[in-house]
Amino acid sequence: MERTEVVLANVKGEIQLFSDDQKAGKMDISVIGEKLTVYHTEVSEEYEGRGFAKILLEKLVSYARENNLKIVPLCPYVHAQFKRHPEEYNDVWLKEKL
């Protein structure tokens, strides 16, 4: 059974994914104001290929929507998913201009 948990301490934190009470993956995030920045997605090697990165992404997006946050996708995986499915993520995707 998989479960996710958002753990924030001050502005930095993680979205953690557990499978049978074992930590299977995480996303490194920070929340400052209305911006949720995701830096890195990681799934433990023994859990690869089970769609766990997608579960983490779904939790990230749900958390952003529930808290009226915009996501800055610095993580290559998240950025690729946002570009691949813009219609699904446009409401939470903060496209910053450099």
Image (cartoon, grey):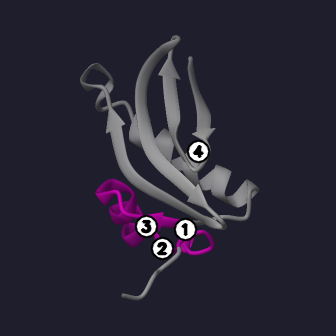
Q: Earlier in the sequence, mark 1 or mark 3?
A: 3
User: Which mark identifies residue 59?
Assistant: 4
Residue 10 falls inside the magenta stretch: no
The amino acid type found where label 1 is placed reads: Tyr
User: Which mark identifies residue 86?
Assistant: 2
Q: Are marks 1 and 3 in contact (CB under 8 Å)?
A: yes
Seen in the image, is 52 located left or right of residue 55? Answer: left
Residue 84 image point, x, y percent: 37, 68
- Extreme residue in the left direction: 45
For label 3, the residue is 82
The amino acid type found where label 3 is placed reads: Phe
Q: Are marks 2 and 1 in contact (CB under 8 Å)?
A: yes
Dividing the picture into quarters, in which one does residue 41 lie? top left
Compared with 21, 39 (above or below) is below
The residue under the point 50% across, 29% down is: 17
For label 1, the residue is 89
Q: Secondary structure at mark 4?
A: helix
Q: Give the Cα separation between the discs numbered 2 and 4.
A: 17 Å
Residue 45 image point, x, y percent: 24, 25
Q: Secondary structure at mark 1?
A: helix
Dot 4, crowdedness within 10 Å: few (<14), some or many (≥20)? many
Q: Are marks 3 and 4 in contact (CB under 8 Å)?
A: no
Stretch of the chain drawn in magenta: 71-93
The amino acid type found where label 4 is placed reads: Lys
Q: Secondary structure at mark 2?
A: helix
Residue 51 image point, x, y percent: 40, 37
Q: Earlier in the sequence, mark 2 or mark 4?
A: 4
Q: Give the Cα separation between the discs numbered 2 and 1.
A: 5 Å
- Front one among 14 and 55: 14
Q: Are marks 2 and 3 in contact (CB under 8 Å)?
A: yes
Q: Earlier in the sequence, mark 1 or mark 4?
A: 4
